[in-house]
Image (cartoon, grey):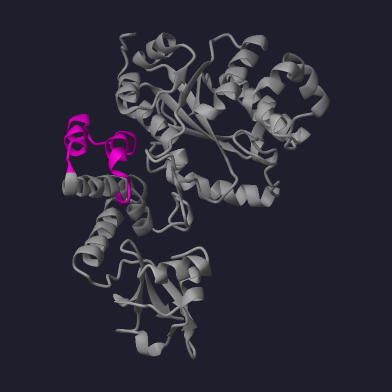
Amino acid sequence: MTTLKSDFLNILTERGFIHQCSDLPGVDALAAKGELVAYVGYDCTAPSLHVGSLLSIMMLHWMQATGAGKPIALMGGGTTRVGDPSGKDETRQLRSIEEIDANKEGLKSVFAKLLTFGAGQSDALMADNAEWLAPLNYIDFLRDVGRHFSVNRMLAMDSAKLRLERDQELSFIEFNYMLLQAYDFVELAKRYGCNLQMGGSDQWGNIVTGSDLGRRMGVKTALHALTCPLLTTSSGAKMGKTAAGAVWLNEAQLSAYDYWQYWRNTEDADVGRFLRLFTTLPIMEIERLAALQGAEINEAKKVLATQATALIHGRDKAEAAALTARKTFEEGQAADGLPVFTATIGEGLGLLRLFVDAGLASSNGEVRKAIANNSISVNDTKVTDPAYTLTAKDLIDGQAKLSLGKKKHVLLRPA
């Protein structure tokens, strides 16, 4: 096994970030000298990134924290207009330029929490590929870039091959995505001396294509590739997905309390792994927590939830979420820190629709099933009648606590 010299790659290795690397000794040598300039690209398909993107952001964080070099967060203002086919069964919905720009502004906020931006040599940089992709002349692009690509090879890439094998449509605009991503690497190399692209393992083909394009287009330095694994939970569920939808990083899309709860509900077998990946706790402390057994593992989950939430939402909101959870679950109180849903009560609100609108369930059928399983409560009192109507009489101190099971709670307050 290769002996690593850089703190950066040693930390990535012991914490489980590395899936593939095109030249581990080469990247290690650059990191040891503080000469890495590495980027990760983020398309602007939504107003927030989700927790699945946090893995690559943490890689940028550790790169800067260990003095390995300069991190670049690349906003996909240009590539989002095309749509990445990787891992998709159908063509992405095309978004307007106005929507992309609005999403881009929403994405930017999370990076400042984990990276230090500035004009210094190791300060992080935020770039936008619309700067060089939007003005491209199509004929010139085909002559200068397109001639270096083999259609045979492009069709063999997973992003195209899987669609074709399933007889699913792959649009021509999506087919061009890998050219644009490869060209990003070349542009960043020319503009900023970028020598490493990082991303999820599903991006491996696109990243090494960019490395190859750089060589063909005369980039003097070697362009390296480093990917992290695409995570699933130990039960096989996709990381960052819940029954209610994606686990967003921006508070406008998901409250700090719900974010805390996502980590608190981690499966026992995943606690140690997620502590390594999504917190900055020392490894020795992580090993101690991961070794806890039985009921004690719940204490490790609380630490995971608080540490992970503090990174994204700040220590104060993380501690407040932990306090709310303790009051709700351990002390039986209707804590004020719970998510709040407002509605006009009027003459009454049907229980089925109310629980769906409040985000506690995805359908009336799910609520009916929960009622049959004795899992629905109003103010900690079980409700067994699907036709139950909540009225102003159910309000206690101007609010009602709605619960589905032991872990999902919302405070209803009249609009």
Taking the spot 64% from the left edge, 35% from the top edge, the residue there is 84
Left or right: residue 312 versus residue 191 is left
The relative height of residue 80 versus residue 326 in the rendered view (above or below) is above
Residue 176 in sight from this viewpoint = no
Residue 317 point in image, percent of width and height? 30, 56
The residue most toward the right is 139
Along the horizontal axis of the image, is 179 left or right of 258? right
What secondary structure characterizes most of the magenta part? helix
Image coords of residue 311 (percent x, y):
33, 44
Residue 267 painted magenta: yes
Identify the image quadrant of residue 208. top right
The range drawn in magenta is 264-293
Vertical side of 195 occupied by 87: above or below: below
In the rendered image of this protein, does residue 342 appear above or below residue 8? below
**Outermost residue, front direction?**
372
Residue 274: x %, y % from top left: 32, 38
- Of 140 and 167, nearer the camera is 167
Q: Is residue 331 visible?
A: yes
Task: Give the quadrant of the N terminus.
Answer: top left
Residue 100, given in percent of the width and then of the height, sits at 63, 47
Q: Quadrant of residue 83?
A: top right
Toward the viewer: 379 or 206? 379
Relative to the observer, which residue lies in front, 384 or 352?
384
Q: Is residue 304 magenta?
A: no
- Total count of labels: 0
The residue shown at (32%, 46%) is 266
Residue at image coords 45%, 50%:
247
Direction from residue 141 to residue 356 in the image, left or right: left
